[in-house]
Structure formats: structure tokens, C-alpha cells
Amino acid sequence: MNLLGIDFEDWYHPELIRRHLKSEKHEPRVINGIDKIIELLNKTNTYATFFVVGELLNHRPEILDKILAEGHEIGFHTMHHTRIDTFDSKEKFLEELQNFDKLTNGKSIGFRAPTFSINESSGWALDILANFGYVYDSSIVPVKTSMYGIQNAEKKPYRISGNNLGKEDPKGKLIEFPIMITKILGKEIPAGGGFYLRLLPSKLINDAIKKYDRMSIPSTFYIHSWELTPELMPRMNLPIKDRFITYYNLKSAVPKLTEILKKFKFTSFDRYISSTN
């Protein structure tokens, strides 16, 4: 059994877009694709965890009911898609966590940091989550990239704490579900979705899932809501590198993910945890 997390955010939330926006006020558009995303999951008999940017629930409170009514899970993705290592204070993060808890009636037990921004300077957030009663996190990519990642972190689920990000901590209260990676020409790279789903050949991703299965490790996969609704994603005039990462092969995301969900069994994090207890 593998894990699927949908980072539910709008067109102006991704870091590579946000850094080039001149205004802080934007009209949500991707939020209107919730029914399309749920229909895709229904067609492939898949349950998923929606890591939702909290401010979108203020725009459309009914999104919570749509997600939960179909048996999917709600998770926390901060209130405004803010990198954890750029938060003004720990108190600000806790305030957002409490706000999201009210918006979701205490339904959330899992967290994913925007841009996988849990690192040596932001591990404190994990301890706040644990003390708040959260059960798991899925913010670690076990390979270092230009934007995120912790080199040589565990590939399999493990107990994590703010003082021990990459390895099993027997005292850790949270379960960490690291994103799937693979190896090409001797170099480890992310392979668990997002840009890498659009970039890598399907066979390479399929082989990575099979390899994890042979090692009895669940493949943790992620996809952004805007990748599943490219028709709602405006094209911004970005620098070449940022434009490539954001928009490359965007129309391939739905068919490639659909193919994967038909070949392999995926479920939400809460259902996986319940099945292994």
C-alpha cells in the first residue's frame, strides 16, 4: 500500500510564482477544481490526503465537507503557504495551527510543510505539531536539491523530532513519511511526484514504486492541485528556470498520475496508519 498526498493550494501559492508577484491580494481559481480532483480519485478507487492551505477554507468552507464526505483526509499545509523557515516566530506558527484546527473541527492529524521546508532551522515546528496532538508529518525529501531536502535521511517511515530530522528518534512523537526517491546514473533524485512526475519517464517512476514495494516501504507520492487542473493555472511571465519547473509538461500530470493510480494501490495517510496499527 502506498500513500498519496495532494497539496491543495492555489495558483499564487507556489514559491516560484509567489516570489515574482507584486501584490498580496489574489483571486483563487484552482480552488474551483476540487470536484475534478475528487472525480479522478473516485475513478481510480483511490483515497488521498488533502494537505490544504488554510486560507482557502476561508474562501470556500464547503471544501472540507467535499473532501471528508468522499472518505479522504484533511491535512495542514499552513494558512498561507509560508515556508516554515521564514516564519516570524514559533508563536505565529502555533497561531496558524490553532486557526486551522478551528476551521477543520479538529480533523487534521497530519502536516506537510510548503516546499518541504522542514530543515535544521525549522525543525522546531515538528515539536509544536507533536505537542498539539498531531500524529505524522510528510515534509522530508531524503535527498538534497536546490530548494529542499535532507541528504541521507531515512527512506522508510520513521519517528522524527525537531532535534533528529533524518533518522529514527525513539523518543519522537511524530511518524515521518518521506517522499519517494530513485537513482539515475548513480545519483539519487526525488521521484515521488510534482515536477518530477512531469519530468521523469513513467517507467522510471513505476520501477521506483516497485523497488520500494520489494523493500516493504510505502511509496509516498505527492501532487499539487494546480497540476491536476492546468486549465485553471494562469501562465505567469517567470524567469526561465522558474518557468520550466512550474509549467513543464503540465498537461501530462493528470494522465501520468492516472496511470500510476491504476497500476498501484494508494491510500490516505490516516487510513494507512490505521491499517498498520
Image: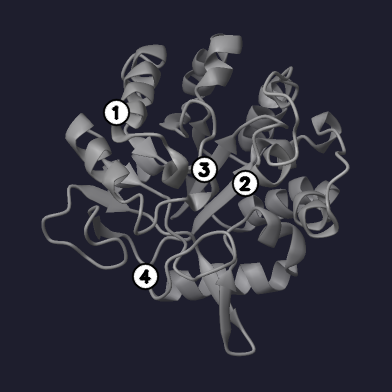
Q: Please tell me which of labels 3 and 4 falls first in the chain.
A: 3
Q: Secondary structure at mark 2?
A: strand
Q: Which residue is mark 2?
A: 223
Q: Position of residue 198 (x, y in %)?
A: 75, 58
What type is the residue that disc 2 sits on?
Ile
Give the mark nearest the N terminus, 4 or 1.
1
- Residue 112 visible in the shown view: no
Residue 3 or residue 264, whichever sits in front: 3
Residue tagged by mark 3?
114
Which label sits in the foreground, 1 or 3?
Answer: 1
As drawn, the residue found furthest toward the left would be 171
Q: Callout 1: few (<14), some (14-19), or many (20+) C-alpha neighbours within 10 Å?
A: few
Q: CA distance from mark 3 to mark 2?
A: 12 Å
* 132 on left or right of 62: left
Q: Judge from the rendering whether residue 64 lies leftward or rightward of residue 177; answer left or right.
A: right
Q: Identify the mark nearer the N-term, 3 or 2.
A: 3
Q: Nearer the viewer, mark 3 or mark 2?
A: 3
Q: Nearer the observer, disc 1 or disc 2?
A: 1
Q: Quadrant of residue 233?
A: top right
Alpha carbons under labels 3 and 4: distance apart? 18 Å
